[in-house]
Image (cartoon, rainbow, N blue to C red):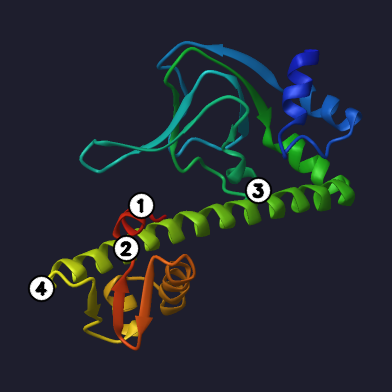
Amino acid sequence: MVLHRVHSQILRSHHLFEPLSDEQLDQLMQGSQLLNLEKGDTLFRQGDPAHFFYFVISGAVKIYRLTPDGQEKVFEVLTNRQTFAEAMMLMDTPNYVASAQTVTPTQLYRFPNATYMRLLQDNNRLAFALLGKLSIRLHQRLNEIETLSLKNATHRVVRYLLTQLGRVQDGSPSFELPMTRQLVAGHLSIQPETFSRIMRHLLDDGIISQEGRVITILDRQRLEQFE
């Protein structure tokens, strides 16, 4: 099929298509289909042969599975400029492991797995370029996970310190940790080094001070707002 110029620019913004030469993209597009779907249309069901992957131009698609008791478990909702089902192709999985259904009127491309895999097999430079793009994305995701994990851990430490402060009977801003840092970290389900890093930030920011196990809250308001 003839690729719309705007769609070409949109596809080129995605890591699966950016490394393709113009000739390779043309080869891929020859077997593709541009689908205009209504809300509730099914693209594939769990267990169907995994012959295609998809790129959303506009709209939204949910990826879900049905539990044994018939309940729907939604794993992800894909929107503009996102692909789905490409993992089946790259992992050489013969069948879709979930179902896909539109949740709004949706326009998307359907690409044949066989054509894309043939391009990878015939061109080592393309395969390495794609590997590089995927590695960058993996690094970005790991950084995002680390940031979210640290934020969650920080919230736990702050809540713990405030809870310990609330147990002080005489209104003093100081209290003694009832256990070692390692045990406190285990109690909060975080790594000891993560606990130490968060405490160091609090100390460096002048929010708390510490002598041995004795913690003094220097600025409760900032502690409550600390992230």
Q: CA distance from mark 3 to mark 4?
A: 63 Å
160 relative position to 32: left or right: left
Q: Position of residue 205 (x, y in %)?
A: 47, 65
Label 3 vs 4, first from the N-terminus? 3
Can residue 31 be seen here? The reply is no
> Which secondary structure lies at badge 4?
loop
What residue is rendered at 13% in x and 71% in y? 167
> Counting other residues with Cα less than 10 Å from the Cα at mark 1, is it few (<14), some (14-19), or many (20 or more)?
few
Residues under numbered marks 1 and 4 in contact, where contact means CB atoms less than 8 Å apart: no
Q: Secondary structure at mark 2?
A: helix
51 with respect to 158 (left or right): right
Residue bearing mark 4: 170
Residue that numbered label 3 is attached to:
90
Residue 198, given in percent of the width and then of the height, sits at: 44, 69
**Left or right of 104 on screen, residue 109:** right
Give how far across and how far down residue 221 sits, in percent. 31, 54
Q: Nearer the viewer, residue 140 or 223?
A: 223
**Cα separation between marks 1 and 2:** 9 Å
Q: CA distance from mark 3 to mark 2?
A: 43 Å
Is 101 placed above or below 69 here? Answer: above
Q: What quarter of the picture does the C terminus occupy?
A: bottom left
Earlier along the polypeptide chain: callout 3 or callout 2?
Answer: 3
